[in-house]
Image (cartoon, grey):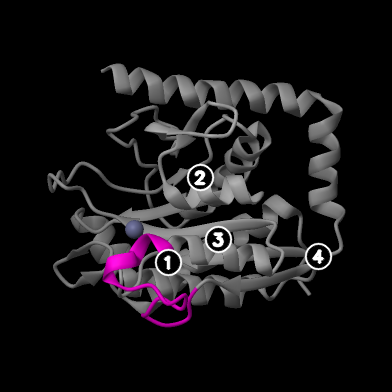
Amino acid sequence: MRLFFKKCISLALCLAASVSLFVSNDFTSEAKSNKTSKNIVVVLDPGHDSTHIGCHYENFEEGLANLYIAYYCKQELEKYSGVTVYMTRYGFDCPYGADQNSKSDCLTGRVDYAKSVGANVIVSLHNDYDPDLDASQNGSKVIIPNPNYKPSYCVVGQNLGSSILNELVGTGLQVNNWKLCPNGTGLVTRDSDSGTYPDGSAKDYYALINRSKTSGIPCIIVEHAFCTNYSDRVNHLSTPEQYQQLGVADATGIAKYYGLALK
Ligand SMILES: [Zn+2]
């Protein structure tokens, strides 16, 4: 219960930061620069690879599904002008030399790669698995940076995450009310229990988000659907056409957030 409150307080702080930044000049100029900047660099991160395989259940393999979704998302996003799209991996192996014994190096490699191509944002693409096989857990959520250390990244996560969630709901998915933080919004933050940022505040729990934050790049994790939910798996996670629908939804959400126009 303590953890529950901690997480939800964290999101409430993000919402407060969102409102206060929204009315400040800083945020206005940031939003404007997002939308008028000549070129946005988006790094799509298909979660997992052969060094750290994701969830698998019945006929579903997460690492493969995420790769499909990323390819379709890239293809769709490249229909817009003013955006360059990269992927952190294009195949099943870690492209950064990591193996089973050094798998966390792969996450560092992905962030370093994003930095090397001048990423404005990292969008990590995943799917979910309920460890208790709780079939009531279904739908989409986006894990966003917590409000600590660089609060503007939380605001980016909030707005970009909302934009993507809107599109995913349009494919028929529900908004996931994650049992670790049941706030009903589908936008969640998760704090590390022990790690801290240079200012002493709690790190984000997920390494990709906290390493991106310290590297100067906002990062969100999109959890599209639950492979442990029958309807999600059959209707959204079973065919290339369904993966395409998810990838297009992600791309449309990203394009709307940045105000991109079709070529
Ligand atoms: Zn995953």
- Which numbered tag is attached to residue 210? 2
Q: Position of residue 64 (x, y in %)?
A: 33, 75
- Which numbered tag is attached to residue 106? 1
Mark nearest the camera among 4 and 2 is 2
- Of mark 1 and mark 4, the one earlier in the sequence is 4
- Of mark 4 and mark 2, the one earlier in the sequence is 4
- Determine the main secondary structure of the stretch shown in magenta: loop
Residue at which label 4 appears:
39
Q: CA distance from mark 1 to mark 4?
A: 27 Å
Q: CA distance from mark 3 to mark 4?
A: 20 Å
Range of residues picked out in magenta? 89-106
Residues at discs 1 and 3 in contact (Cβ within 8 Å): no
Residue 82 within the segment the image draws in magenta: no
Q: Position of residue 169 (x, y in %)?
A: 45, 50
Quadrant of the rendered image containing residue 36: bottom right
**Three-letter amino acid code at the position of disc 2:** Asn
Residue labelled 4 has its Cβ within 8 Å of some atom of ligand 1? no
User: Is 217 positioned to the left or the right of 23 in the image?
Assistant: left
Relative to 186, residue 207 above or below: below
Tell me which residue sits at (60%, 36%) in the image. Answer: 154
User: Is 223 positioned to the left or the right of 30 in the image?
Assistant: left
Residue labelled 1 has its Cβ within 8 Å of some atom of ligand 1? no
| Few, some or many residues within 10 Å of mark 4 (<14, 14–19, 20+) | some
Q: CA distance from mark 1 to mark 3?
A: 9 Å
**Three-letter amino acid code at the position of disc 3:** Val
Q: CA distance from mark 3 to mark 2?
A: 10 Å
Tell me which residue sits at (42%, 63%) in the image. Answer: 105
